[in-house]
Amino acid sequence: MDRNKKNSSGMQSKRRKTPAKRGVRKNKTVVSSAKTAALCAVIVAACFILLFINTEHGTDSGNTRGQQVSRTETTQEETGMQPPVQSVRGKNTEETSLQDTPEFSGRKAAPSQAEDEAASSAEREPAPRTTEERTYAPSASSALPKSASVKSAPVQQEKNIQASERSSVQTEKAQGQGTPELPAIPPAVNNARLVFVFDDAGQNVSQLEKYVALPFPITVAVLPKLAYSKACADRVRKSGNEVMLHQPMQAVNRNVNPGPGAITPDMPASRIAALVRQNIAEIGPVAGVNNHEGSLISEDEVKIGAVMQAVNESGAFFLDSRTTSQTRVPQASMELGIPYYERNVFLDNSKDRGEIVGEIMRGLDIANTKGAVIMIGHVWSADVLPAILIEMYPALKNKGYVFTTVSRSGAIIRP
């Protein structure tokens, strides 16, 4: 009995201890869950804090960019100009140039409007002409300064002003009004005729192209026995313009070589006539002949008379280039009864623009006095003279001047 009681009491004590141990385990589990929940709460709070900080940073950056664009737009509105047209650029090039700058380091943000305008302005002006452009217009490979977005507006404004001034100058030229570049064009008297002769063709064709492209009729004098003599003569005829033989003759300065096919002082009249006919046949058909150099020959009445006789027999006219004030062409004309033309103005003794324009203006005075003027320029002035004539042509035409060739000028001098 006692043993049974002890056993039952021992079992009861064991049964009591089991719930206690289980309770302890449950309490430990509850404590662990609470710590986990607290840790999660801390993590969530940290995430919210980081999200808030990032949101504030993005807002500040956006505001800064918006203020930059706003300042640029305000400057454009105050100056009354439109934003410059952006040049077409490769995407890779644009991203690289922006990422290399301190402002865009470490991120691939799209460029702002003001910064893109500054970069576009730098590409359009690789060699700035003003102090302001040299300061604020970097090359494509250099870093883009922060002030570029603000400075691009004055640079563009200056370009707009220059474009407006050029447009105004062109309008005044078309109306024949005086400008800093060109003087006022006087009205033509009785449809005064202008004749432009261009000597020394035959050395190359490229320079000649600028003259045959002029928007009015011209006369071109071609030197004989050169590599491109025949090609130049053919090109002038193909363009519908007038061709002359530019006959080389010895100058008073015997150190000056007039070139192949030249008339020299030791030649008799018969040899002179034969040489002139030979040169005409090479260049021809020609409308006329004028002298290249030749001051020594044209001061000799017999020799220049032989030239005029051969030209007349070939059915062409003779134009005295008047390379000397002592020319004997008028006397030979009276002796032989042969009419002739004479040069009034040399356009390009100097290639200075102002002097060339001055000679053209002098030619206009002669044309208004005599009814026509013959002005001689040279093919080797192709880098200056054609551009000046194209520039003046609208105003001259608007003022009533007539452009023609030597043979149609009516400026012939009869004995």
Image (tube, helix red, strand yellow):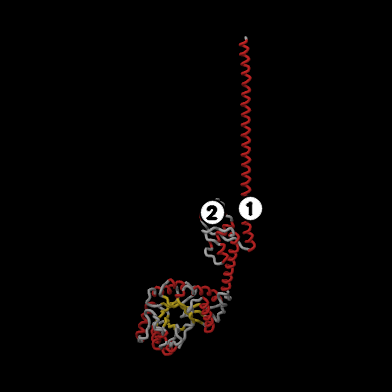
| Label 2, label 1: how far apart the Cα atoms are | 20 Å
- Could you tell me the amino acid type at mark 2? Gln
Residue 377 pos. (x, y %): 47, 78
- Would you identify the image quadrant in which residue 114 lies? bottom right
Please report the residue visible at 63 percent of the width from the left and 15 percent of the height from the top. 9
Q: Can you say whether 93 is above or below 237 in the image?
A: above
- Could you tell me the amino acid type at mark 1? Asn
Of the 4 image quadrants, the one containing the N terminus is top right
Q: Of the numbered discs in the image, which one, if any, rests on residue 63?
A: 1
Marks counted in the figure total 2
* Callouts 2 and 1 close, C-beta under 8 Å: no
Q: Can you say whether 173 is above or below 275 in the image?
A: above
**Depth check: 225 or 181 in front?**
181
Residue 385 pos. (x, y %): 49, 75
- Would you identify the image quadrant in which residue 34 lies? top right
- SS for dot 1: helix
**Depth check: 302 or 407 in front?**
302
- Which residue extends farthest top? 1
Mark 1 or mark 2, which is nearer the start of the sequence? 1
Q: Of the numbered discs in the image, which one, if any, rests on residue 311?
A: none
**Depth check: 68 or 41 in front?**
41
Of the 4 image quadrants, the one containing the C terminus is bottom left
- Would you identify the image quadrant in which residue 78 lies? bottom right
Q: Can you say whether 345 is above or below 45 in the image?
A: below
Q: Can you say whether 80 is above or below 293 in the image?
A: above
**Depth check: 400 or 32 in front?**
32
Residue 304 pos. (x, y %): 40, 86
Please report the residue visible at 63 percent of the width from the left and 36 percent of the height from the top. 38
**Is the residue marked by circle 1 packed among few (<14), some (14-19), or many (20+) residues within 10 Å?**
few
Residue 188 pos. (x, y %): 55, 80
**Is the residue marked by circle 2 packed among few (<14), some (14-19), or many (20+) residues within 10 Å?**
some
Residue bearing the label numbered 2? 99
